[in-house]
Amino acid sequence: MKAKPVEPVDGIGQKLVPAAFTLVLAILSVIPLGIPGYAQVTPNFVLMSIYYWTIYRPDHLPYLVVFLVGLLVDLLTFGPPGVTPFALLILRATVLSQRRFFVGKNFPILWWGFAIVTAAVTLLMWSVGALYSGRLLDPRSFVFQAVLTAACYPVLSWAFSRVQRVMTR
């Protein structure tokens, strides 16, 4: 029996794919696995999703969705409400303003840009966390999470590109 080709996603479904992926990744990021210290070093999948979709499909990932996903992450992690949405909105605005530079570039340049964005968002989250707690936080878990996030980006970017191809066939 011959396998059927994957049908392209049309209309409203096409517009919901980036938001749905980002929401699913946000939920997967906070699922407790029972591994001590896992939450502090989980790759920031939401950051990867927002970066990718802001470059390739910014019209399908509006600021409101980014804000709501960030707020959901804060609520599910019992973090200070507003910190994650603030960081993600700054990320989206920054990447959107530089989108022309990234579109059409080869993957190493996109990855380099993602590494810079990850470092900046990590520094922002660490700074706000320190201000919120009133003390300097140990930066090691933040740095490890940033490195792990940048290292995992190629895999998720590849998956997103496959989904995008199905969306545009």
Image: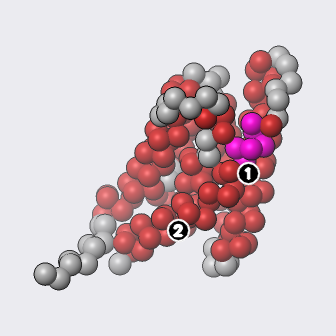
Identify the residue under disc 1. Answer: 147
Q: In the image, is 64 to the left or to the right of 92?
A: left
Q: Is residue 121 visible?
A: no
- Where is residue 105 drawn, in percent x and y? 67, 78
Per the model, the C-alpha gap separating discs 1 and 2 is: 18 Å
The image's mark for residue 158 is 2
Residue located at (42% from left, 66% from top): 163
Q: Is residue 112 above or below residue 141?
A: below
Look at label 1 and name its amino acid.
Val
- Front disc: 1 or 2: 1
Q: Which residues are magenta?
A: 141-147
Q: Earlier in the sequence, mark 1 or mark 2?
A: 1
Identify the residue at the far right of this view: 136
Identify the residue at the far front of this view: 35
Which sits in the foreground, 4 or 96? 4
Q: In the image, is 139 to the left or to the right of 148?
A: right
Q: Is residue 154 visible?
A: yes
Residue located at (63% from left, 79% from top): 104
* Numbered disc 2: secondary structure: helix
142 within the magenta span: yes
Q: Quadrant of the C terminus?
A: bottom left
- Where is residue 38 drawn, in percent x and y? 61, 35
The image's mark for residue 61 is none
Q: Main secondary structure of the magenta part?
A: helix
Which sits in the foreground, 100 or 167? 167
Q: Is residue 87 above or below residue 34?
A: below
* Numbered disc 1: secondary structure: helix
Packing grade of label 2 (10 A; few <14, some 14-19, many >=20) is few
CB under 8 Å between discs 1 and 2: no
Q: In the image, is 117 to the left or to the right of 60?
A: right
Identify the residue at the far bottom of this view: 2
Q: Is residue 38 above or below residue 58?
A: above
